[in-house]
Amino acid sequence: MSKILIVEDEESIADLEKDYLELSGFEVEIENQGDTGLVRAIKEDFDLLILDLMLPEVDGFEICREVREKKDIPIIMVSAKKDDIDKIRGLGLGADDYMTKPFSPSELVARVKAHLARYERLVGSGKKENDIVEIRGIKIDKTARRVWVNGEEKQFTTKEFDLLTFLAENPNRVFTKEELFREIWPPIVAFAEEHHVKVAIENCPMWFDATNWPGGQNLFTTPDIWRRCFEILPSPSFGINYDPSHFIWQQMDYIRPLYEFKDRIFHVHYKDIKLYPEKLARVGVMAYPLQYMEPKLPGLGDVNWAKYVSALTDIGYSGYTCIEVEDRAFEGSRERILDSLRLSKRYLEQYVI
């Protein structure tokens, strides 16, 4: 019989969850305090943890982090907090699932059964050997998601790890960006969709120095590419983090795509870019972009913010936004950075409440 710990400060909710789980044959314990729940989760043997976020003494995020450092058991977070950022943080700390209150107790039971079954398949008796790929001085542990290069362990992001593994398992072949997109992104988006999280890729070429030019480190840069990616991956959990400034320096229309891709825009940036025509005339569009443009605070560059915000209201956008500060004129001190935020806020209040 699987043993489950519920850490939940609302006793009525905890009792209801316990009743439904016990009817399904689980042994269930309840803790109403975060600190005592953390101690029991670490010291006692439980097969699954159901964890509220808003707890006395120690919150659910901290409990999840500490338990995940010491134990490999399924963790289901439950909370009345509906913001994507809380879901992303919880899943990033190692939670396997995130349920938003109110939810059906029957759905909770179904998810508990699914996670326990999945862990049983993945972990089993613990005797299964890790899946290892080795090639030309690179050793990849697919099970533990660890990488060594010439004996030295290296750190990779999730996408970097998946890409390296795919290339190592298919040596001596050249792949197009579209082929790599088809291979790497669908499992990531499927995982996000399963956990009710949206993935938004910024339309930034992602070049951080001249060595990244001209290709950049991001495929998702133009409307033509977006159309193709959405054909390949039509999931409603996959979309765009829209920044108009990147269209400015590429000399593209930054208003029209808002209307075409209105249902795919999950997040927007408020950042400006100033083009210098005299520099552009001297070096040309094939030069490294910082040779003819500069990132600026909103209102100090070439974005028409009245038109941009008007288009956002036209399409009914009501999602998250952020002011992205990359203006080098405001670097150098904490006070200058704070000045940049004050000025940006003051300017944008003409258009945004």
Image (cartoon, rainbow, N blue to C red):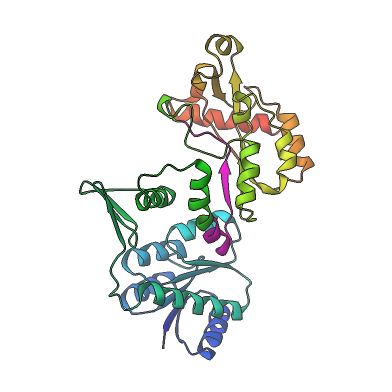
Compared to 308, does 95 lie above or below? below
Q: Looking at this rendering, what residue extends furthest in the right direction?
A: 314
Lateral position of residue 256 relative to residue 332, left or right: right
> Residue 107 location, x and y as percent?
60, 77
Left or right: 117, with 169 as reference point: right
Rendering coords of residue 32 (x, y %) = 47, 76
User: For the view shown, which residue lies furthest in the left direction?
Assistant: 151
Pick whichever, 69 or 214, lies toward us. 214
Q: What residue lies at 53% left-to-right and 57% top-to-bottom?
A: 86
Q: Nearer the viewer, residue 3 or 156?
A: 156
Residue 226 visible in rendering: yes
- The answer to whether 139 is drawn above or below residue 348 in the figure is below
Q: Residue at x 54, y 16 (%)?
A: 292
The number of discs equals 0
- Where does the magenta region start and end? 189-207
Q: Is 70 left or right of 202, judged from the image as shown? A: left
Q: Residue at x 74, y 34 (%)?
A: 256
The answer to whether one can see residue 351 in this image is no
Would residue 189 appear left or right of 72 to someone viewing this image? right
Q: Residue lying at the far front in this picture: please name it.
A: 172
